[in-house]
Image (tube, rainbow, N blue to C red):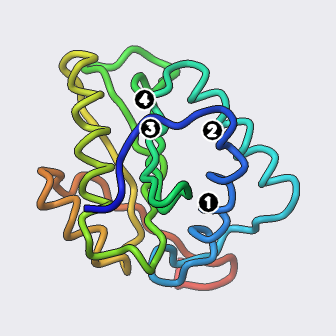
Amino acid sequence: MDWRTRPAKQSEVGEIILLWKAFMKDPLAIDEPIPTNEENEKKEAQFISELIQEDSHQVLVAEKGGGLIGYVACQVEQKAPIEMSRKRSFIHDLYVSPTHRGQGVGRSLLRACLDHLKGAGPRQVRIAVWVRNEGAIRLYREMGFSDHLLVMKTETGIGSA
């Protein structure tokens, strides 16, 4: 293993955003590319920065040769508008550069994230994944996740409703 997993630093937000932009355009990871325009980039940078500020273990990075090759972003305590029966955490993003996939980087990032969340006490951990992202689905299932919620969509004017 020639890479390491560790908490992100505020000074790395720009490099994390470069990974995020690649993630949002990756046809193997996302079914519908999300615009990486200036406004979205600024919002994502603010979000990542706030997660790091709250708890540096909420954003973990995989580093190789002084550069970042992957990251995971989560929230220890997912805020809900009403009181829930259990505490919830949410994993927002897990991304590994295509050239570093299949080497255990994603598994290492996810394991470190789950270990941190476990330290926060009993909770349900959720993650959303696009249905075509078979590699991620396989990893999540291997790491103990199970199917929980089906989100469906249609386009305006399409369908028989």
Q: Distance between the residues labelled 3 and 4?
A: 9 Å
Q: How far apart are marks 3 and 1 (CA)?
A: 14 Å
Q: Which residue position is annotated with label 1?
A: 20
Q: Which residue position is annotated with label 4?
A: 57
- Is residue 118 or residue 130 the one in the foreground? 118
Q: Is mark 3 on a helix, strand or loop?
A: strand
- Residue shown at 84%/64% (left/top)? 37
Mark with earlier residue (3, 4): 4
- Is residue 146 or residue 43 the one in the foreground? 43
Residue 133 x %, y % = 36, 76
**Of the numbered discs in the image, which one, if any, rests on residue 74?**
3
Instruction: Look at the image and tell me in which quarter the N terminus lies.
Output: bottom left
Q: How far apart are marks 1 and 2 (CA)?
A: 10 Å
Do labels 1 and 2 touch, CB within 8 Å?
yes
Amino acid on which disc 3 is placed? Cys
Mark with earlier residue (4, 1): 1
Q: How far apart are marks 3 and 2 (CA)?
A: 9 Å
Occupied quadrant, residue 23: bottom right
Residue 17 x %, y % = 68, 54
Q: Is mark 2 on a helix, strand or loop?
A: helix
- Residue shown at 16%/54% (left/top)? 146
Q: Is mark 1 on a helix, strand or loop?
A: helix
Amino acid on which disc 4 is placed? His
Residue 151 relative to residue 30: left or right: left
Q: What element carries label 4?
A: helix
Mark nearer the viewer, 3 or 4: 4
Residue 75 x %, y % = 45, 31
Mark with earlier residue (2, 4): 2
